[in-house]
Image: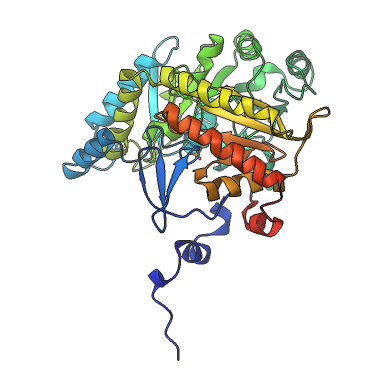
Amino acid sequence: MTAEPAPNARSLRQRDAEVIAEIARLRFSPLSLVGGRGNRLIEEGGREILDLSASAGPAALGYGHPAIVEAVAQATSNMAGASLLLYPNDNAVSLAETLLAITPGEGGRKVWFGHSGSDANDCAVRVLQAATGRTRFISFIGSYHGNLSGSMGVSGHTAMTHTLPRPGLVLLPYPDPFRPRFPAEAVLDLLDYQFETTCPPDQVAALFVEPLMSDGGLIVPPPGFLKALAARCRRHGIKLVVDEVKVGLGRSGLLHCFEHEEVVPDMVVFGKGLGGGLPLSALVGPRDIMDHAPAFALQTTAGNPVATAAGRVVVETILRERLWEHAARVGQVFADGLRALADRHACIGEVRGRGLAVGIDLVADRATRAPVPVTTTAKVIYRGYELGAAFSYVGLKGNVLEFTPPLTLTEAEAREGVAIVDQALADVAAGRVSDAAVAPFMMW
Ligand SMILES: *Cc1c(COP(=O)(O)O)cnc(C)c1O
């Protein structure tokens, strides 16, 4: 009998493939991690990788930020319990106070804490239905609000067509200025027509919207669109829920992404970057809805003092250092650098975004704006990894490179990222990445 090799004789990737369930996997490259420092990930073997995605958003302050390290160490070494259910703790209460202070809104409001964007949107759906007595919701084709039953039920991403949306959901097209098949006026007209016909507005509890659509393709809505939605919601007594999970808390170049349109939402959902890498989400909404029923959406470890210690530090750091201004400035350097590559790479259809949420729409043909096949996008990501940068793709056709780096990205790192993307695009065009190399990575 031959003994199994000790687990550490095999690579992290091999061990991962054996024990981590396929359903939860979304790998874009062979990168496997043993550490992280600043805006760099450390690959097994020790190579440093420039992180242009912040682990898909949560690493708002990068990795090993001294203030987070200290706050978490303190919160764990003298733990004020491990839950918010039975006793309040100062970190959770202080973070809630800060979130209320920085989030525009009308009337008395309260905060609910969860672990993820998924559970926060899930809580929002349930509490809105219960408190308003209205059972229908409106959201957008391409939207991603999470992966729990309730939050999936109001999402419109093609990656979710394996599960039906909730009954009565109305999915509207999200106006995409680059491919204006459904311009904003047409979408608003369709919404009005729904209200006049099969979706009476008094049946609708809320409209969920991403103020900048991320997973659906890094789409910046045309000016005035969010405002027009907000006006319709107000007119019909429908709550406007703005999902800031991916693009909020400084990423867009303003503290809140909805501020680009002077919209005041009824409810705001925070996640990803809020915890700086620890599981933390928050829902901010009207008191009468949030207090609808006691013990309405309980999760034992939600709001625990460790995750909220990290959240406090993240929010305090963003506010103290005005990181939204930094995101706007470095995002401009990064996006300008990428735009300048369009001269050399015919596949760049458009570079778009706000602040440090930037996308490159890759096209097979600039005239028709037909998307490249997803294999091309996957190859750019693969080659980017080989060259030392981590990023991924979004979009219903899988043709949009998405960059959501830590808000602490420096201008030098932004330029380094541009150079790597430039080289990756050139190498893929020259056929330097094979189909076989990327075959295991197309999961989205
Ligand atoms: C990622 C994301 C979610 C879900 O957050 P999880 O932490 O993955 O549960 C919800 N909404 C938006 C806009 C997101 O990008």
In which quadrant of the rendered image does the N terminus lie?
Answer: bottom left
Examine the image and state in which quarter residue 222 appears. top right
Examine the image and state in which quarter residue 164 appears. top right
Q: Is residue 384 above or below residue 290?
A: below
Q: Residue furthest left?
A: 78
Where is residue 18? Give x, y as percent: 51, 67
Q: Is residue 285 left or right of residue 317?
A: right
Examine the image and state in which quarter residue 298 appears. top left
Where is residue 191? Give x, y as percent: 73, 18
Q: Give whichever of 182, 358 is nearer the camera.
A: 358
The residue that appears at 73% across and 35% down in the rendered structure is 347
Q: How many marks?
A: 0
Model colouring:
rainbow
Is any part of residue 163 visible from this angle?
A: no
Where is residue 358? Give x, y as percent: 57, 28
Q: Residue furthest bottom?
A: 1
Q: Give whichever of 261, 399 is nearer the camera.
A: 399
The residue that appears at 26% across and 39% down in the rendered structure is 69
Q: Is residue 270 above or below residue 50?
A: above
Is any part of residue 42 visible from this angle?
A: yes
Where is residue 340? Give x, y as percent: 62, 25
